[in-house]
Amino acid sequence: VNEFLGRMEALFSPDLFIIGGGVSKKHELFFPYLKTQARIVPAKMLNEAGIIGAAMAARAIR
């Protein structure tokens, strides 16, 4: 993750990384070890965003 974020930071110079999915569920265990200039935060819905999005899409089809 650290290597990937480092490459993304070099390419795009972001101010913030928002990390979602399963990785975000245990963010407190490894976020302190990530070395980026940009701030790193977990996504607000953590790993639930995909489930919520799928439910909203299914509802819209009806």
Image (cartoon, rainbow, N blue to C red):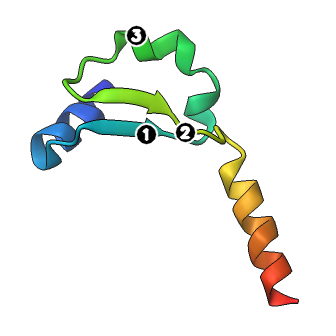
User: Which disc, if any, is residue 43?
Assistant: 2
How crowded pointer 3 is (Cα within 10 Å; few <14, some 14-19, many 20+) is rated as few
User: In terms of sequence position, does the residue under pointer 2 or pointer 3 come before the other?
Assistant: 3
Q: Determine the secondary structure under disc 2.
A: loop
Q: Given contact means CB atoms under 8 Å apart, are the residues at marks 2 and 3 in contact?
A: no
Local secondary structure at mark 3: helix
**From what the image shows, is residue 49 above or below residue 22?**
below
On the image, the x and y values in percent for residue 39 come to 31, 27
Q: Residue at x 47, y 14 (%)?
A: 30
Q: Quadrant of residue 52?
A: bottom right
Mark 2 nearby-residue class (10 Å; few <14, some 14–19, many ≥20): some
- Give whichever of discs 1 and 3 has the lower sequence position: 1
| Left or right: 14, with 19 as reference point | left
Q: Which image quadrant is residue 22 in?
A: top right
Report how many numbered discs are placed on residues in the image: 3
| Dot 1 and dot 2 residues touching (CB under 8 Å) | yes
Q: Position of residue 62 (x, y in %)?
A: 88, 89
Q: CA distance from mark 1 to mark 3?
A: 14 Å
Please name the amino acid that badge 3 sits on: Pro
**Which residue occupies 28% across, 34% down?**
5
- For residue 32, which numbered disc appears in the image? 3
Q: Residue at x 76, y 56 (%)?
A: 51
Nearest-to-viewer mark from 2 and 3: 2
Q: Amino acid at mark 2?
A: Ala
